Structure formats: structure tokens, C-alpha cells
Image: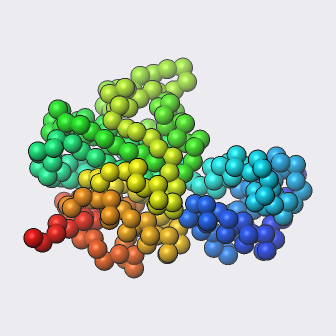
Amino acid sequence: MNIGEQQISLSDEIFRLLRDMVYEISGIYFSEDSKFIMEGRLQQSVKRKQFDNFRDYYYFLKYDQKRDEELASLIDIITIHETYFFRESQQLQTFHQEVLPELAQMETKTKRLRIWSAGCSTGEEPYTLSMLILESPLFHDWTIEIYASDISQSVLHHARRGIYQPSSFRTTDPYYQRKYFTKEESGFKIADRVKKNVTFLHLNLNDQEKWILFPRTNAIFCRNVIIYFDLSAKKKVVEGFYEKLKEGGYLFLGHSESLMNLSTHYALKHFKNDLVYQKPFLVK
């Protein structure tokens, strides 16, 4: 917001109505003490629609025939898309050096590796996973399927373009940037051999009826996504992931996240550099 520009106030009543709408659509929950966050993020949206109060904006979102486009914009604005290549490198090292060899052993007959990046944002995570798999000698003649999903159409458009600015490489070893990107006027373009392994899909994690799109998978990455959900939504998503994982498959969460009070179905496996949740093998 520009200096001197008048801020539109968000009442407690309309905040709760907007919060419930956002929760119903996305599973993202704004607690009472985060009203100011929603108020700040939606200021320009209210003014862009030429409303002078949040109540009219809410009624537009709820009843107007053109509400779908604005709802998509709303989700883009309130969700956080901060990401970069090789984020949480210690965990990725575990994936590359220890988990991938395990998965290769499990799928020796099928020679097919499936991974789901849930909440993929602008694509840095699934492309990172693709690069790490390409770096492994174990998968040269395999079918690699990386499904990358997000609730935001705009970030998926960015991901499909595959062109990135220097800020996306803040923790990237120059080796990867030289090998898998080409410099263009508009930024750095990801190589086709990385891109071909990744399929981007528009998906709301809160809408599990659409999870049928995904086959059973060897590993799921859902890092720093469910921290924005309430307890009920977290449990629902985590149990859904369990059903989508193959036996012996792995669930990667962000380092600040855990499954405590969410699920007892997973086993916590200790690797050299990290701990990762695993779907246990059924006892036969």
C-alpha cells in the first residue's frame, strides 16, 4: 500500500466470514490473532474491485457471477509462495544418497519411480527432485514420474514456463545451474530433460475427491504446506498421503513440522543426516 493511502478496516464479523470461506476453499486457516494479515493482504483486492469496505467484497466473492476469477486471485494472494532450488539441503541429501537407493531396490522389477510434490509453488522443488534423480546412476533407463500440484493457477503457470530469476538459486551449487539451465534475457531456463519428468496439476489438497488423479507413489514431498491448516485439515491430508504411498514409501515434511498428534500410522526412520516418515511394510 502506498504511503498516505487510507487503509480499509476489516471488521471481526467479516473477517470470520472471509476466514471460513478461505478455509472451505483451501483448508488454510486464519486464527483470530491473524486478522491483520488478511486485512493487509487483501487491501488492494478490495480497492481494485472499487469497493470501499470488506463487506461488499465478501458478498461479491460469495454471490457474483464473476466470483470464480476473483476467488482464484484471492487464493494466490493469501498463500505464500516463497521457495527456491535445493531448499532444506540436508533433507535432499538424505533423499539423494539414502532414500533413492532404497526405492531403486523396491522397484527393480517395474523400473518406475513415482514422486508427488504437494504444494509445489513455482516449481523449484519438483525440478530439484528431477535433477537429483538424473544425477543418480540408478535410474538411467527408468520411467520417472514426478507429479507437482498446487492450489494456485498463477504459480503453476510460472512453473510450466520453467524460467527463473537469480533469487531462486540462492542455495544452488553452481554445478547444477551450469548443467541444467541456459541463460536467457528473461532469466535462466530449465533444461527439457529435467522438465520432461514433471507433470504439473492444479489441485486443492483439501479436495480429496480429486486425489484419484494420483497413482500410488514412492515418495511425497509436502514441505511447509500443512502448517497453514488447522488440526482437522492436517489430519485429513496426512491420512490421505498414507493411502497414496506405497508400502515402504516416504513422506517428507518441512523441518519445523512433525506428525505428532496427527497420525500414528507412519514410522519415523533415522538416516545419517535426517529423520523421515515412512509407510511401514505390512506384515505377511
Q: Look at 43% across and 65% down and name the residue there.
A: 237
Figure disc tally: 0
In the foreground, 163 or 146: 146
Screen quadrant of the C terminus: bottom left
Q: Residue furthest bottom?
A: 261
Quadrant of the image occupied by residue 281: bottom left
Quadrant of the image occupied by residue 15: bottom right
Residue 191 appears anywhere in the view: yes
Position of residue 80 in the picture relative to residue 269 (left or right): right
Q: Look at 76% across and 47% down and name the residue there.
A: 66
Picture coordinates of residue 24 (x, y %)? 61, 65
Picture coordinates of residue 17 (x, y %)? 73, 70
Residue 166 appears anywhere in the view: no
In the foreground, 58 or 100: 58
Up/down of 118 relative to 239, above or below? above
Position of residue 94 in the picture relative to residue 69 (left or right): left
Picture coordinates of residue 69 (x, y %)? 70, 46
Asked which colour scheme the image uses, the reply is rainbow
Q: Look at 37% across and 26% down and name the residue there.
A: 191
Picture coordinates of residue 87 (x, y %)? 40, 49
Position of residue 62 in the picture relative to residue 149 (left or right): right
Q: Look at 46% across and 48% down and name the residue there.
A: 149
Quadrant of the image occupied by residue 183: top left
In the foreground, 269 or 91: 269
